[in-house]
Every structure is written in C-alpha cells, then in structure tokens.
Amino acid sequence: MTRVMIADDHAVVRDGLKHILEGAGKFDVVGEAADGAAIPLIVNDCAPNVLLLDLSMPGRSGLELIRLLRESHPALRILVLTMHSEEQYIVRAFQAGAAGYLTKESAADELVTAINHVAVGGTYVSQSIAGKLASSFLGNSDDVPHRRLSNRELEVYRRLVRGELLTTIADALCVSPKTVSTYKMRLMEKMQMPNEVQLVRYALRHHLFDDGDNL
C-alpha cells in the first residue's frame, strides 16, 4: 500500500480525494493537513510516501514547502494538486522539487495514475500541463518581469491582484503587515510598476492568475 498524505485547506476537497484513493484499494491515507505551517510536523509523524499538496494554503506557501520538504525528506514524493494551471507555477513547482503536477479539474480522471507514477520514482504531468511546460522552455524569455519575483513575492502579487488588504494577506501568510508591505515594495520595484493598477493590468495582460483565484 502506498502511504499518502493530503494537504488542502478545503475539507470538501480532502474528503473527495480520500474517497477516490480509498476506492482504488491500494492507497492508505495516513494524514491530512489544512494549514501549510502544520505540514512539516504531520509529515514527520505519519511518514507518507506521497504528499498531495495544494499550492495555495494558509500559513505557508506551497512552493516554499516543496523545497523545504525535499531537503528534509528526500525520499518523499510530492504531487502538486492545485487550481493553478499557469505556467509560472508549474515551472516553479518542478524547480523546487515536485515530482508531479496535476490540476484539480483533472483529479478525478488522473489522480490514481499520477500517484502510481510518482510513487515509483517517476514524474507525472497531464497533457495540458506538458504543453505549457514545453512552451515555457522553448519560447519564453527569462527576463519577463514576473519571473524576477521570489515565490513569496509572487504569492503576495497574486493576492494583491485578488484585491486582498495587506492585513488579510498577512493573516493568510502568518506574517506581519509590515512584512507584507516590504514584499509589496520589492515586487513593485522588480516589476518596475509605480502602482497597483499597473500590477493588475500586467497580470491581466499576461494571464498570470487566471485559475484558482477564488480558492
């Protein structure tokens, strides 16, 4: 039996994933997490073979967690399961050490296959994700402004575009509003944007945050 841990802040999503895995008959769901900050501790306690990880969770960025867990648990296979199908998230997740990337809309059809692949050391991406990865590596310049952002700056950018207040962002990321203000200042400098209106226009023009901005 493959030991699987599910990390998603939505209970309905966790229940749905657990139902799919239990129905397959060859997975043991050994742990669940609803907060990013709790994930390392739960991984230590339940020792999963595969972690299903949502990128957008309160407490800690999913991209940061991938890098942290790959360093502390090199044998752990991490399968990203998210609403984000945008290229910058896909590329950053694999750069951080993810073994697979799957969108929630395709989970019902592909989840079991994806876990089977990553559990034995393979890599899994759906066909639509593979196409975006190919276009990223073949055609896009590394000098586009949003690629200069750190993972945390990108997360703050996403939340600013959603219209979240600095205090709301601070609560979600478990940092102080002053820290969020610093991230905002840095990302605006890197993007060379004078105000939030320009940030929103850039995000819309480049389709940066098309998916999952309601989760």
Image (tube, rainbow, N blue to C red):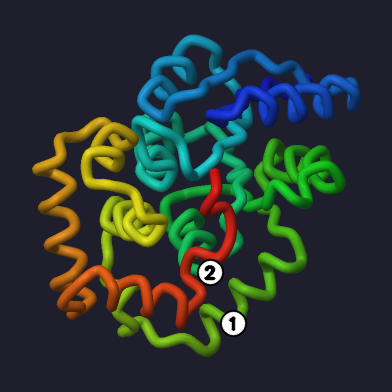
Give the answer, above or below, for where 98 lies relative to 89: above
Q: Residues within 10 Å of mark 2 (few under 14, many from 20)?
A: many
Name the kind of residue labelled 2 in the image. Glu
- Circles 1 and 2: CB distance less than 8 Å? yes
What's the residue at 68%, 75% (across, down)? 131
Quarter in which the N terminus is drawn? top right
Seen in the picture, residue 116 relative to 193 is either above or below; the reply is above
Q: Is residue 20 left or right of residue 39?
A: right
Percent position of residue 44, x then y: 44, 15
Q: Amino acid at mark 1?
A: Ser
Residue at the disc numbered 2 = 87
Left or right relative to 28: residue 132:
left
Quarter of the figure with residue 28: top right
Q: Is residue 47 above or below residue 60?
A: above
- The span from disc 1 to disc 2 (Cα, nearest Å) is 9 Å
Q: Could you tell whether 11 is left or right of 158 in the image? A: right
> Dividing the picture into quarters, in which one does residue 59 lie?
top left
Give x and y (percent) for residue 6. 61, 26
Please tell me which residue lies in front, 166 or 189: 166
Q: Which of pointers 1 and 2 indicates the residue nearer the eye?
A: 2
**Residue 43 picture location, percent across and down:** 48, 20
Judging by the rendered image, the residue that carries numbered circle 1 is: 135
Element type at mark 2: helix
Task: Kindly identify the residue that appears in the image at 78 percent across and 39 percent down.
Answer: 116
Q: Quadrant of residue 32?
A: top right
- What secondary structure is found at the residue carrying circle 1? helix
